[in-house]
Amino acid sequence: MKHWNRRLSLQAVLALAAALAAPLPALAQAKLKVAGIYTVPVEQQWVSRIHKALNAAKARGEIDYVFSENVANADYERVMRQYAEGGQQFVIGESFAVEAAARKVAKEYPKTAFLMGSSGKPQAPNFAVFDNYIQEPAYLTGMLAGGLTKSNLIGMVGGYPIPEVNRLMHAFMEGAKEVNPKVKFSVTFIGSWFDPPKAKEAAFAMIDKGADVMYAERFGVSDAAKERKVLAIGNVIDTQAQYPDTVVASALWHMEPTVDAALKKVKDGKFTAEDYGPLSMMKVGGSALSPLGTFEKKVPAELMAKVKAKEKAILDGKFTVKVNDGEPKSTP
């Protein structure tokens, strides 16, 4: 009996040794457990880009993806902790209004990878940050706006004057001034990331004062532009299909390079605290100027030539859009 047990033990040891020496294809192919935490609906411009990129990874069979939307700031820490406790390996979200709480949770769960939209720096070992660095296409859309305005007044409606919004507005304004030094701007912030009626009313007020091109940083602005028959420039997503006679072009954000890079690092066991912001730049496919579509023949060829030349200069590294995170102001 003892001899049989000894033989069985030896076989078990040999089997274990062989298993340890072999690669682990099952583990390598296992789907990552991913969670998204959003303070607004997933339809909101900014969040929709993250949601789209994660759904693409899910469709490829790479991840199991769950999410919470409309999470109040007061509940954000609790939801983060809930997902970490539940075994989610990768948590992505937005910590702009909850920086201290989000970073505290990350410290408590060092084995969970956190990638958060943030105005701050990465926090070792597992709190990485990202941002929509789409100031380059924002500059290009500004050139379009500056060349198309007849009243020389452009209206700009934003959510909050935080760096992520400010730098896009400033880039847009600089682009407009490059082609039209006479242009002026009316700037307002509605104090919300998702309040289309409030954004619409703010836009109406600007149009009433003579703005004939609107910068739609928030949902609701393009509705006002459509009703008053003025032009609009989109931000983050392309809404021209919904506003074919209103939205000239948009500065598009593509979150796929950021999401895919982070997922690969988590899967390879190489995820660390770093800044993923540069993966939103045009040269790596993180952002782009949308096609003109319905405005293809409405934008003057001379203006479009200038925009295309500037786009090429950006992609070739011959022109750098300056980053200005200060709060933009209306011009007198």
Image (cartoon, rainbow, N blue to C red):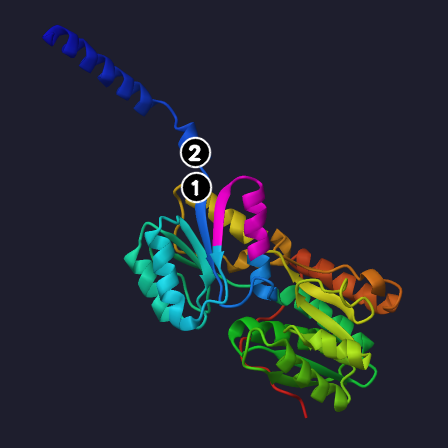
Q: Which of the pair 122/16 is nearer the observer?
A: 16
State whether residue 126 appears in this view. Answer: no
Mark 1 neighbour class, 10 Å CA radius: few under 14, some 14 to 19, many 20 or more: some
Residue placed furthest toward the bottom: 332
Viewer-nearest residue: 120 or 78 = 78
Q: Quadrant of the C terminus?
A: bottom right
For marks 1 and 2, the one nearer the N-term is: 2
Please give the residue where the numbered disc 1 appears in the rendered image.
267
Q: Secondary structure at mark 1?
A: helix
- 295 to the left or right of 281: right
Locate the N terminus and report the quarter of the image it occupies: top left
Residue range of the region highlighted in magenta in the rendering: 51-66
Residue for badge 2 = 28
Question: Residue drawn at (63%, 54%), measured in percent from left and top?
Answer: 283
- Identified by mark 2, the residue type is Ala
Amino acid at circle 1: Lys
Q: Is residue 262 magenta?
A: no
Number of the label disc, if any, that sits on residue 27? none
Q: CA distance from mark 1 to mark 2?
A: 8 Å
Magenta region includes residue 64: yes
